[in-house]
Amino acid sequence: MSGAGDVQRSGRTITRRSALRGAGIAGGLGGTGLVLPARATGTTIVSWASAGQRWEFPEKGVYPLFQKKFPDIAVQVVAEPIADMLPKTAIALASKSDRYDVIFDDYNYVPQFIAEGALEPLEPYLDKDPAFKQDILADIPENVLDLYRDKPAAQGGKLYGLPPDGNVQLQYYRADVFEKAGLKPAETWEDVIMISQELSKGGKARVVGSTLKRGLWSGAAFITLLRCYGGDWFDKMEPGGWHPTLDTELGHKAFGVLQRLVPYLEPTSLNASDDEANTAMLNGTWVYAPFEPAGSTMNDPKFTRFAHEWKVTVVPKGIGDKARHAPHMAGLGLLLPVYSHNKDAAWEWIKFCCSGNKQDPAIGKAWVENTGQPARASLLKEYSNIRPYFTGMMDSFPVAIRFLPIPESDTLYEVVGTQVSAAIIGQKTPAEALKDMQAQATKIMTKGGYYKT
């Protein structure tokens, strides 16, 4: 078995860095990038993305098609690991940096950026091309596009981003391992504990995984469990509400499940973001991930010899009258900073990356073949033959629940995730962690003015 940082490609072991280099650009560039050519008289835009699958690779994959249509626009792709890139974008926009023309960012940051006045509204651009606007509004589910609006479409919300990337937590399992052990995917979180115990029998190395990196990642894991048991962040998200409901009976149930799961988790889980999780699943270190964000490389033989074994289904639900399947909605979209000096050229790149078959079937095909994960329903359906997990995404979208649509969202997930991590490693008891996250969340909402009468 290859090491935890390696990926299997075409029968040979390669490192993550060589995998990225093989796709055209090394990860972790930290402010550098590859300039793709245009005519000397043209415009160069800078597109900032997370390194690797779903983001950097598909952007580079569709670029030759873009260059044919727009030979006078060059794209400089700047890529670095997702766990580093996401918080850096918040700093860049808060400081009004004009370096980036497009940012391929997690929608969780969008409410904050809108509140700061850092994003260009996309409605004026969409209105100039009614056919494209009608097509994309019909093809991407409204609840997915709402992630990039200042408020839901039903309330007259306006778009500040477009998603070429859709995502949702899925229950990933290795079919070959489950069949040999006589196991089926979990329906409830009690089933998850049973499966994890069974996979660990006989002193085997722990092979269950989750993204529990301190902060945003562990915060999202806890909130998913809380929602699966029928709870959520607040009593209600409207005036007179916004009171955190974390240190509650349902919060203790959710934390109890996480506490019982941790002994069976493979050690890299405790510091895993998407990058570490994908690597562990590709090389066989993990064989079960009960609530893992979707990833395109697990069904791609170029990256793993287990491509035909990784299967998905919906995230398990809790136990009790309020129990539900409640996977976390995820996904990244293309944003246009107000500080860009090349907005028209940047819009053409955003529109191109988000194109569907009515614009040019070759674009969607190139996006998927270069490990992209579309938000368009038509592309998910069309390419589920080569990416079977696309079907699981479509099944999960209707029950998925988003990050909070408020500017404080990222801060709230960070403080909750920090408390979760403290309890996992034994610095606090779960009861102490729940009490502290409740107090800190209340403080954040008080400072935000949510309790003013």
Image (cartoon, helix red, strand yellow):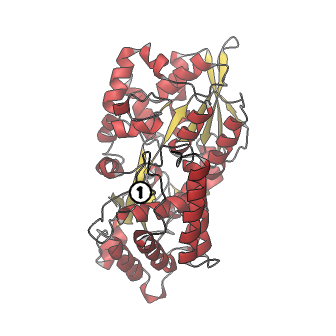
Visible residue check, residue 6: no
The amino acid marked with disc number 1 is Asp
Classify 10 Å Cα crowding around label 1: few (below 14), some (14-19), many (20 and above): some
Q: Which residue lies furthest to the top in this view?
A: 41
Task: From the viewer's side, name the closer residue of 413 and 15.
Answer: 413
x then y, percent, for residue 8: 53, 59
Residue hosting label 1: 235
Q: Quadrant of residue 368?
A: top left
Q: Quarter of the image for the N terminus: give it.
A: bottom right
Q: Does dot 1 land on a helix, a strand or a loop?
A: loop
Residue 229, image x and y in percent? 35, 66
> x%, y% of residue 69?
51, 16
At x 49%, y 59%, the residue is: 244
User: Is residue 96 found left or right of 117 in the rendered image?
Assistant: right
Give the percent coordinates (x, y) of residue 436. 59, 68
Judge by depth and name the residue closer to the eye, 195 or 262: 262
Q: In the displayed orientation, state which residue is furthest to the bottom.
A: 202
From this viewpoint, which residue is outermost toward the front?
Answer: 453
The correct choice, above or below, for 158 with respect to 41 in the image is below
Q: Which residue is drawn at 32% across and 31% down?
A: 139
